[in-house]
Image (cartoon, rainbow, N blue to C red):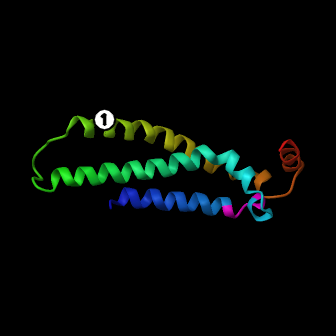
């Protein structure tokens, strides 16, 4: 496993820890957090799986001949998909990290009561 994959797993763990420290989570309103950050969580897990798959495939390519440069069409396609998903992953992760710092998630408020009344 590469250091990059390990760092992505740690980043997901830190994001989850920041979710767990919110008032919304401690009160038991997991659905509210999940609906707000569903896309970020799905993209994070998908990006980690995609990164590990890409790195494993790359290691299998260069394992037998480390100085050869041979990328198949499938590897190029997976690499391109990885880069596209990376842009989405970094955008949504940064957005989630900024949104979770909102004081509305860390204390009881009228906003939370409104969110619960719409459910």
Q: Looking at the picture, how far across and down is residue 33, in whole percent? A: 71, 52
Query: Label 1 crowding class (10 Å Cα cut-off): few <14, some 14-19, many 20+?
Result: few
Q: Looking at the picture, how far across and down is residue 101, in whole percent? A: 69, 53
Q: For this view, does 87 lie left or right of residue 71?
A: right
Q: Looking at the picture, how far across and down is residue 52, in whole percent? A: 36, 54
Q: Looking at the picture, how far across and down is residue 65, in whole percent? A: 9, 52
Q: Residue 22 magenta-drawn?
A: yes
Tell me what residue is drawn at x 38 percent, y 41 percent. Answer: 82
Q: For this view, does 68 lie left or right of residue 115?
A: left
Chain part drawn in magenta: 20-24
**Disc 1 marks which residue?**
77
Tell me the element at label 1.
Answer: helix
Tell me what residue is drawn at x 47 percent, y 60 percent. Answer: 9
Could one spot residue 94 in this view of the protein?
Answer: no
- Classify the position of the N terminus by image quarter: bottom left
Q: Residue 42 magenta-drawn?
A: no
């Amino acid at each position: 496993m590469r250091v990059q994959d390990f760092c992505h797993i740690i980043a997901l763990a830190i994001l989850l820890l920041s979710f767990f420290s919110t008032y919304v989570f401690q009160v038991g309103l997991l659905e509210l957090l999940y609906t707000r950050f569903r896309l970020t969580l799905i993209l994070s897990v998908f990006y980690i799986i995609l990164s590990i798959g890409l790195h494993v495939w790359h290691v299998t390519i260069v394992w037998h001949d480390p100085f050869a440069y041979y990328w198949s069409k499938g590897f190029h396609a997976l690499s391109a998909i990885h880069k596209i998903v990376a842009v989405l992953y970094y955008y949504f992760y940064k957005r989630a990290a900024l949104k979770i710092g909102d004081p509305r998630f860390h204390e009881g408020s009228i906003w939370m009561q409104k969110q619960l009344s719409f459910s």
